[in-house]
Image (tube, rainbow, N blue to C red):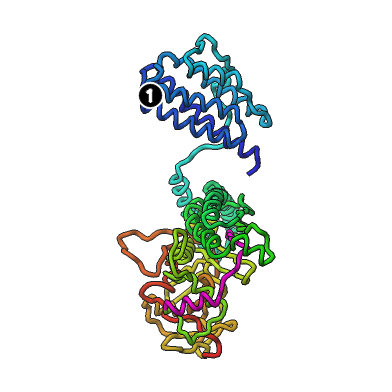
Amino acid sequence: MDYIALLKDYLDDANSHLAVFDDSLMALESNGFNNDLVMRVLGALHTLKGNSGMMGFESLKVYIHNIEELLKQVNDNEIELVEIIAGLLDSANVIRNALQQIEKNPDASPDLGEDILTVQQLLNGSGNESEKKSVELSSYLGTKTDTIKVDFKRLDDLLNLVGELVIYKTRLNQIETEIRGVVNNKPLTKELKDGLEFMGKIIAGLQEGIMRARMLPVNHVFSKFPRMVRDLAKSQGKEIQLLFEGEDTELDKTVIDELEEPLLHIIRNAIDHGIEVSRDRVNKGKAQKGTIVLSAAQESNYVIIKVRDDGKGIDFDSVREAAVKKGLIKPEDAPDKDNIISLIFSAGFTTKNEATDISGRGIGLDVVSRNISKLNGHVTVDSIPEKETSFTIKLPLSLAIIPALMAEAGDEVYAIPMSAVDESIKVREEDIHVINNHEVIRFRERVLPVIRLNDFFGLNRKRKKRFYLVILGRADRRIAIAVDRLRGQQEIVIKPLDETFGKSYGIAGASILGDGRIVLIVDVMSFWNGRNKISFEEQKPNNV
């Protein structure tokens, strides 16, 4: 965010705190001392003081601090309110003038040296209340603002209404196609088609506008980590710098709110397991200070967030050894690099023998995988031993309207979130093999588990000789979902299922197609978890 935009936010916020100051002082003047009102003023001034210091307005910060001290003396009965109320009202005008000066000249910093001395005289009981601060009448109106505060639920309601428009726009397009087939009136059908196209553009613009109104820069999350990184690095005797890239990239607020915990675990993992102490780094020919880079970039309808560290990378032998001890794999198994990486996301997995305050309990990366999957996202890991490790998170811009792959299983249509889809292929029944009573397929030098959507939902339909496999990814694991037919990709509006349906296993929600049909949205996490949990890992190709 550039300085002018930041300054505008500062002035908007400052004027709201000044309004609290003004209103409370008026009430105190009319009704006398009230502890709740004084505490309300102190809260507003404290925030305004901190924001002013952050913006570099040191003189204004010091002035507000002195006003705080004056109010604290009132609250502690050291000074009678009636003796200084006029001075407090005058101080509001001092702040008002300072804000107006900043608005007129963003490069200037108000000098309130004389005003600070006046307040200090009040603190010492020697103030002269006859000295009133002049103020322009227009300054009482405050600075003009381009922003308003809106309850997020209102934006949710608006987005739901837009979702309904999207659904019925698709329905009207289908009706228009049917009408052209039965009505022999080209001018009329052309006018209808043009009208629907124009309406579609308006709805698309309305949808985009509301989606943007719900978005926040990812810096709202990123900015919470520098202090944590500093403290954790100090506690481990490490030197680590945290760098940001693309922090202005925007995401839906609902996604932003759910992103904090996964990033916390990944960054904590980089500090504890990845970055070496300075002495070891220097011995390896690395920079003395380790680096963690937190970056974000938009790609189409997705945001790609990466956490990269220049530490020692993943020790694949240690991971394999820990997995054998925990019974996740057998001693004779020889998993490849991708399978080893997928093990670090297993519940309870850790390579440490003892837990510390930071890690070692095996809950961090498991939380990352589960939480990102709940966001219809996808996380992958790449690591070069003794060089770096990077976690890449792919998330949809919004959780309300998402791109989905429409797939048929039996007579039903299901929506599979595109964020979890790697690719799709057409196969024959003879391409499927069986290992340990589980169906698998050999695909790109890997053997993937196969789950038939018909069987998963208990549809018991007759199997076709030719069908499609949708390859899904979770971390570095892959799984193939068998469906009868693919109907293409489209944006869908997610509708939560009513609680009266109870817990619908394998279903994340529902949507309505243009023809009025209800489609269920597949919960891709259910293919790995729960009652149908796959009890085997991907096999090596030579096992087939």
Residue 229, given in percent of the width and then of the height, sits at: 55, 53
Q: Is residue 521 inside the magenta stretch?
A: no
Camera-side residue of 228 and 392: 228
Q: Is residue 305 magenta?
A: yes
How many labels, in total? 1
| As drawn, 140 above or below 307 | above
Tag 1's secondary structure?
loop
**Badge 1 is on which residue?**
76
Pick the front one: 192 or 2? 2
Q: Is 48 located above or below residue 116 in the figure?
A: below
Q: Nearer the viewer, residue 8 or 311?
A: 311
Position of 309 relative to 384 (above/below): above
Amino acid beneath label 1: Asp
- In depth, the one of 341 and 62 nearer the eye is 62
**Residue at (52% x, 79% y) in the render:** 469
Q: Alpha-carbon neighbours of circle 1 within 10 Å: few (<14), some, or many (≥20)?
A: few
Residue 435 is at least partly visible in this image = yes
Residue 499 location, x and y as percent?
A: 32, 59
Residue 104: name its quadrant: top right
Name the residue rendered at 36%, 26% in the picture: 35
Horizontal side of 20 relative to 442 (left or right) equals left
Vertical order, 324 against 306 (above or below): below
**Residue at figure coordinates x 61%, y 25% from the top left:** 100
- Image: magenta residue range: 302-326
Q: Position of residue 333 (x, y in %)?
A: 49, 85
